[in-house]
Amino acid sequence: MMQKPIRKKTIVSMVSFGLALSLIAGCTGNKDGADSGKAGNGTGPVTLTYFSEDGSPNWNNMQDRIGKVITEKTGVVLDAEFAVGDPVQKVSIMAATGEVPDLIAAKSDIGKLVDVGAVLDLTDLIEEHAPNIKKMLGDKIVRAKYSLDDQAIYAVPTWSAIDERKFKADGGFQLQHRVVKEAGYPEIRTIKDYEKVITDYLAKHPTDENGNKNIGLTINADDWHMYQVTNMGFFTTGAPDDGEYYVDQETFDVTYHFRRPEEREYFRWLNHMNDIGLLDKESFVQKTDQFKSKVSSGRVLGLIDPAWDYGDAQQALKAAGKFDQTYGHYPVTLSEEYKDTNFWSAGFDGGYGIAISSECKDPVAAIKFLDYLASEEGQILMNWGIEGKDYIVQDGKRTVPKEVQEKMDSEGSAYMKESGLGLYWNLSVHFGDGIEDSTGNYFTKTNSDLLTATYSESEKEALAAYKVEHWRDLFPKEEEFPERKAGAVYNIALPSDSQATILMAKMKDITWKRIPEAVMAKPENFDKVWDDYMAELEKAGVEEMEEAFGQYVKDRVKLWSDQ
């Protein structure tokens, strides 16, 4: 059992006392008390400050259509800040100074704030003022608890969807539709299959129609995007996404995933791609905007990047009518002995979410704001937008008219900024894809029929050639994998002074230096660079880190299974 971290109980007690006084006073300013469902005192909305470790490039200060309705319904407007640069450092500064916004989405770094009493235990607030959150979580609320030793709820889970049945493939390896079409739509199952299609296309089309060089494969390794590069080590070798760890699903022992011998071979392949000129030489030095600019030019034949990361660039291609230069998703692995694990479900794993700070000017308004977003009305609003503008109801079914879908495709991020679609989904607990509301309609637009309606003719042609309805059909199904009793362990929040936290920072520094070095090395030097990398990890205490983090994983399994 891990030693329970020391917390500043005095701070927490003072916060609790202050909260109690605010509840007695009716801190929303309504005569009928705090349960009226709307903040404010009649003079205007309450402004709550908010910080998120995730970016939101299309955020429009809640002046979009959806944001205005949310403010009307809740009496709250967010003064939001989104991470630029290293979000971990930003949260660390907040913890050190005590200057924490009203609401904060600190992901796994919430432990830094818990340690100094900077966030509230939301258990009572949820019980008294958040019926929608309480109902949606149900018996899964145990998965929102912080740890086995400290069973407070410090964040409303917002990242993992409730009862999701994923329809959409966002990961895997991406190839432009024109590339696979010219190849005759071959099976693309292994890294060698993927490589061959790119090689053959470049041999015939070294430049685009304007004489600019086509790029076989580029990757985004800018700052935290490096995780998207390194994550493919486990995705291509049969392991699910558990962040920087590989978890034995029987013993719950963990391994720093780069230490798995099979992952060496994946990075050896990237080294090979660099050696033969198929990997963009600027991959490890380009910034995200440069990466997106290349993708939006239509010159990049292949990507190994989640759709949410290159989505803006793909929208630019659609807006330019370059639909055959957008991307399909393929379940590529190191060899056929492995299964792509993009659809290996972690179940609802609580974890990442939004906390209310101990300095929040109106905790009840804050929890009610989050609760409205968890209501059926709020869920439909966030996912579908405004009826008559973003969707219509036809024969009892919500649908997006063709002309509206075409406008979404052509305007891209401009439509998102105007409507607010896609900007609020992770601001509260929410249902996932494939779940019906009380009217028999799906909460999200990612369902079979509506997904098909978003496909371009190039995309439909590719899917038809592979004899599938959706890209998801090419991937191994969820039921092919065992239950993950620890969920996705990357979202376990650790005390800032734990050995696992301290050592992980060292491992990250080593890995982010060594992986580019190994990929860019001459092939004859690859093994030496990799062996030196492994030795450096061992010297830095990787085994001690694995043992320490493994105990947190085992504690989580015990917490979840004992309830």
Image (spheres, helix red, strand yellow):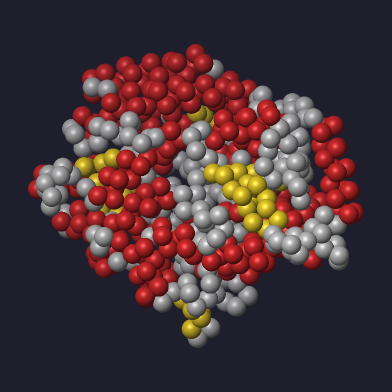
Question: Residue 434 or 377: which is nearer the viewer?
Answer: 377
Q: Residue furthest top?
A: 539
Relative to 438, is 32 above or below? above
**Residue depicted at 24% across the width and 36% down the height:** 279
Question: Residue 272 or 30: which is nearer the viewer?
Answer: 30
Relative to 315, is 496 above or below? above
Q: State the count of labels.
A: 0
Relative to 556, is 160 above or below? below
**Residue depicted at 18% across the width and 32% down the height:** 276
Is 547 left, or right, of 282 in this rendering? right
Q: Position of residue 59 (x, y in %)?
A: 51, 53
Residue 421 showing in the rendered view: no
Is 470 left, or right, of 438 in this rendering? left
Q: Position of residue 557 (x, y in %)?
A: 66, 41
Is 427 left, or right, of 114 in this rendering? left
**Residue depicted at 40% across the width and 73% down the height:** 404
**Residue depicted at 56% across the width and 38% down the height:** 490
Q: Position of residue 172 (x, y in %)?
A: 37, 48
Relative to 304, is 226 above or below? above
Q: Quadrant of residue 520?
A: top left
Question: Residue 485 or 31: which is nearer the viewer?
Answer: 31
Residue 439 showing in the rendered view: yes
Question: Residue 170 or 140: which is nearer the viewer?
Answer: 170
